[in-house]
Image (cartoon, coloured by chain):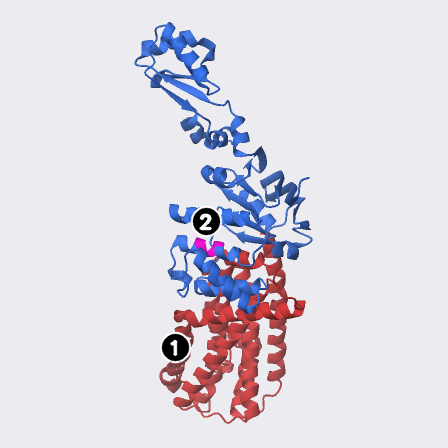
Chain colours: A red, B blue
Amino acid sequence: MTTHSAAYWAASDSMTMIRRSMRHSLRDLESLLISVMLPIMLMLLFVYVFGGAIDVGTEYVNYVVPGIILLCAGYGASTTALSVSTDMHTGVIDRFRSLPIVGSAVLTGHVVASMARNAFSTLVVVAVAILVGFRPEASVLGYMGALAMVLLFVLALSWVSVVVGLVANSVEAAGAFSFFILFLPYVSSAFVPPDTMPAVLQGFADHQPVTPMIETIRALLMGTPAGDSAWTAVAWFGAIALLSFVASMSLFRRSRSR
Amino acid sequence: MSDQIIRVSGVHKAFGDLTVLDGIDLGVERGTVLALLGPNGAGKTTLVRILATLLAPDAGTATVAGHDVVGDAAKVRATIGLTGQYAAVDELLTGEENLLMMARLSRLDHAGGRMRTAELLRRFDLVDAATRRVKTYSGGMRRRLDLAISMIGRPPVIVLDEPTTGLDPRSRLTLWAVIDELVDAGTTILLTTQYLEEAERLADRIVLIDHGRVVAEGTADELKSRLAGELVELAFADASDHARAMAVLGGRVQHPEPERLVVSVPTDGSAADIRGLLNDMERSGVPVTSIELTRPSLDDVFLELTEPAPATRLATNR
């Protein structure tokens, strides 16, 4: 045993787990393929199939790109539930827990890998968007801001997914969470302006956290003022990330005695 | 003086209404092998999980190398290597990557981890499969990898939960040889098994548990001697010979078995005793067609001391 400080080992364990989860992401070909194909398909679907019929006052592709970014990032982050649940339901978690390491490093590994995965799929979305006519007018700062917002969104949803993965009774149940997340952006300002929706849905769309996030990313990419929506989005997703992080840690510790 | 590296005293564990461990006491001497033997559902795995700090006992204490499994879990984890009942391997990584990852998590440095990985791959006959993903491994290969992983940090105590379940005979022999080597090197081993042969072959002491309690404890020989001892079985040609033998032997008969035309009589196993018995039969004019000497096996001890399910009782209660 080499002598190093506890902090060194905590960092080393986290790095080991991050490498593990990254390898998983790269080797799970089906999921990797879906995370690349999904943005492309959705982009083509919305721009060429629905787009012609939707009038938002500007080029539809410019309107819809932030929504597709979040749809894909949300889906990508939610698959973390599946990875966590798989770990919990195979012997591998017992192995990690019986080692003298910070057990929760395995959760951190999943979340960091999720962020890397989704940063990549976001780049794919933007690249495809530009190919089909997306013309952002953002400054360098605007791009960085938009990326930071996407990563905050992914961070929050990944930790929520960890909670789902920890409480799900089966891997299948954890997988179902992806569908819920996949539908959340539809009832927001992602694809159509909420004021075209029935009153009940409009109320939900106006007040759910995805809407200010969409508005912020749209403003950052198109170089328009984001207004209060940026703060609202940061508050929402910052709080969601923090709460679900705390919940994950406590659930992880408690699941020991099951 | 005894030097118990694992000590369990008065451990209780219940899941809801189901009491799984009902006051277990046991100790394992440093450098020895203890086999935990018991029917399915006896509480073996629960006890293993408590020792591996994966479960906390409801009452009682358990220590490994003096560290409490609840209060000092981190130190216990640094002391033991665990192989659970289900292969705890990462399917998307290769065998080699699994070992390297666990080496890193077990605080081995880079070079040390590589050396140890190469050594264990060789020892467990996994060199050819080292760079293949574990997903493609057979059940036996997974278990071998799992065992290799639990040994990576050279822990002084290794806990094996049914280590040879699902292994082919050759892999089982390989594992037994590895356990022998580990014991020679001073490692303490606690293993659970449902194979009595395995317990007898490997263990210095055997603890038999049933319904969460220790029902017997000792060496294989000590446990066997708790039963009646050796029996000599005399076989006869027909029912009338059998009946006459019963009359001659009277109270000495332990198991009259008219349907098999045999009787069993206790013996000390010596030639003189058996000669005397055969002479008695000769004098009474009852021809014995064959004799068979039976020693109680560990199976008999197991069946005698553990409470069988009703169906098994019928089948075994000859």
Image vertical order of residue B59 relative to residue B221, above or below: below
Circles 1, 2 touching at the beta carbon (< 8 Å):
no
Residue A206 numbered tag: none
Apparent side of residue A74 relative to residue A44 in the rendered image (left or right): right
Tell me which segment is drawn in magenta: B143-147
Q: Quadrant of the C terminus of chain B?
A: top left
Give the secondary structure at mark 2. helix
Chain under label 2?
B
Work out whether residue B146 or residue B21 is closer to the camera in this orientation and state it: B146
Dividing the image into 4 quarters, which one contains the N terminus of chain B?
A: top right
Expressed as whole percent of the image width and height from the top left, the position of residue B4 reads 65, 43
Query: Which of the numbered marks, if any, corresponds to residue A37?
Result: 1
Residue visible at 46% across and 83% down? A123
Residue B134 percent across, percent down from the top left = 42, 61
Q: Secondary structure at mark 1?
A: helix
Q: Is residue A174 visible?
A: no
